[in-house]
Structure formats: C-alpha cells, structure tokens
Image (cartoon, grey):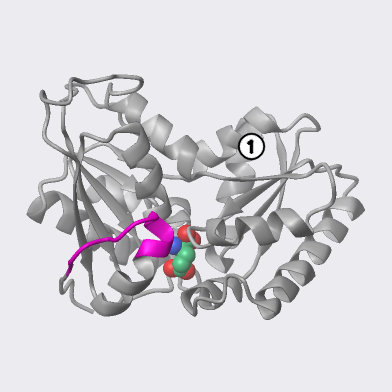
Amino acid sequence: MTHTATQPSESPVIGVFDSGFGGLTVLKALLTHMPHAQYAFLGDTARLPYGSKSQRTIARYAAESAQFLVNEQKAEFLVIACNTASALAMEAIQAAVPVPVLGVIEPGAAAAAAHSRTRNVLVVATEATVHSHAYAAACQRQGLHGVEKACPLLVPLVEEGWVDHPVTEQVVSIYLDELMAEAQAAGQRPDTLVLGCTHYPLLHKVFQSKVPVGVQVIDSAEATAAAAARMLGLAGRSLRADAVPAPSIRCFATDSVEKFERLGSRFLGHSVGKVSLVDLGG
Ligand code: DGL
C-alpha cells in the first residue's frame, strides 16, 4: 500500500533510503524527474547487506532509517530505493513515519507489464526479496507470471567494483542459465528480465549481453521516479528556473563514508559530494 500526497510543494524534501549506496541509481532517476526537489539520501552501510537477513531485522533497520529521514532530515515523502526493504518492510516503515512512502516493487512490476508481450517475466533479486515472493505477487497483480531467482553473489561483486569483470560475467551467466532452465521447465516464454536489486543496474550491460535474444532487461529506478513525481503532483511540470531553489542532495551513511564518496559516483553518475556519518544504533 502507498499513500497519496495531498499538497504538492514546489521543492519538497524527498527522503531516499537504501541499505547501501546502490539506491543512488534511483536518486539519479528522481533527479531527472524532479530536479528542483531537495533530497536527503541515507545508505545504511553499517548494516548492509539486508538481502541475507530476516524479515524482522530488515523491518527494524528500515523503520529506524525512515525515522531518521523524516524526524531529523524533515523528509515529506519517502522513496524506498532498496528492493529488499520494499519487499519486506513497507508496513513497518509506513507504521513508523507519518509521510507517504513509495517502494520500488510495484513500479518495477508495472514497468515489466509495459514491456512484456508474452506476459512471462524473470526477476533477479536478493535472497530475502525472492524468498518474500513480493515481485511474483506484484507481477500477478499486473497480469504477469514472474519467475524469480536469488543472485546472492552479485551484491558483493558490485560492492567490490567488479562490474566489468570476467568473474562477474561468469556468475551472471550461471544464474541466468539456471533461471532460464527453471522458466522453460515451467512452460514460460519470458521476454523481460527485471533487475530487482539496487546493485544490478550497474550490471545492466552484462545482463543484457547474456540473456537470450528477445529478452529485454529493465530496472525499477525510472518507473519508481515517475511514480514518485505523479504522487507528488510534480509529473511533467516545467518550473521557471528562478522560481525554485536549485536541486540539493545531502547524503548520509551509517558507516564507510569514504567508500560511499568513492563508489557512490558510479551509481549516481556524478560526485555525491560530502557524505555525513550517522549513528542509528545497532
Ligand atoms: N539494497 C538491496 C536491494 O535492493 C541490495 C543490497 C543488500 O542486500 O542490502 O535489495
């Protein structure tokens, strides 16, 4: 469930949350759709990865992170860029903060529905996301059949910066072969692959080069940003440059600030600036 914002503001404070800095791919898309908003991005790097943890732990971490963005950074709207938190912690987040919250799963499934002709889609994600079957359920709501696959080795490889690495290519190939075999055994003819994890868009080219011809690789960042702009009443608005403040981005991390500053630019496409360290407890 998501809430709908009622009072659009010209430059709302939008809180963007991820377990790490991979969610900067979603912030990048948000900047394109709403360049005049003010962004507070939190990467819970001290407690990453979420994808291998239990629902209870993910919900607690995500709720605390959401409270930081709303209570301390005054976010009026939250985008949960983390697929794992979107899959397992939406209710906990919504209960923890009094602002509208948008996750990435429903927009991702909607994007798949817009692309797929065969109505058969593949989803790759973390262990926890796949175990929750949140994508399969969201696909079903869109009239799609989704076959999901956990790819636990990919987050560490991307964190290591191995995005153009033969080992990563081989790992992607193995996961895709297994996923295709599973889809075929179920009589599916997939034509769309959803990258259901913040880190996988950095491997978009690798995935696209390894999927069978005719399968399109998509991620939820663009669809999520478009949905956020609609909810905030800012979709397709062209504002006078002098009427609103310039876009502002404040980044926070719970650990590894230097690594965030160094690697974050890969996800955002430009420098993330100075990252502030925050302590959300254990
Ligand atoms: N942000 C997570 C996701 O999108 C990936 C990293 C993690 O496991 O925490 O699922």
- SS at badge 1: helix
Q: Image quarter for residue 273?
A: bottom left
Residue at 17% across / 34% down in the picture?
12
Q: Position of residue 234 (x, y in %)?
A: 28, 23
Q: Is-magenta flag for residue 108?
A: no
Q: Nearer the viewer, residue 282 or 208?
A: 208
Q: Which of 129 and 56 is in front in this view?
A: 129
Q: Is residue 270 shown left or right of residue 118?
A: left
Q: In which quarter of the image is the N terminus?
A: top left
Q: Quadrant of the C terminus?
A: bottom left
Q: Mark 1 packing: few (<14 Cα in 10 Å), some, or many (20+)? A: many
Q: Can residue 22 be seen in this view?
A: no
Q: Is residue 13 visible?
A: yes
Image: 167 above or below 241 = below
The amino acid beneath tag 1 is: Ala
Q: Is-magenta flag for residue 268?
A: yes
Residue at 15% across / 74% down in the picture?
279
Q: Is mark 1 within 8 Å of ligand 1?
A: no
Q: Where is residue 33 in the image (x, y as percent from the top left)?
A: 35, 32
Q: Mark 1 points at which residue?
A: 112
Q: Is residue 1 shown left or right of residue 217?
A: left
Q: Which stretch did the figure color magenta?
A: 265-275
Q: Image quarter for residue 59?
A: bottom left
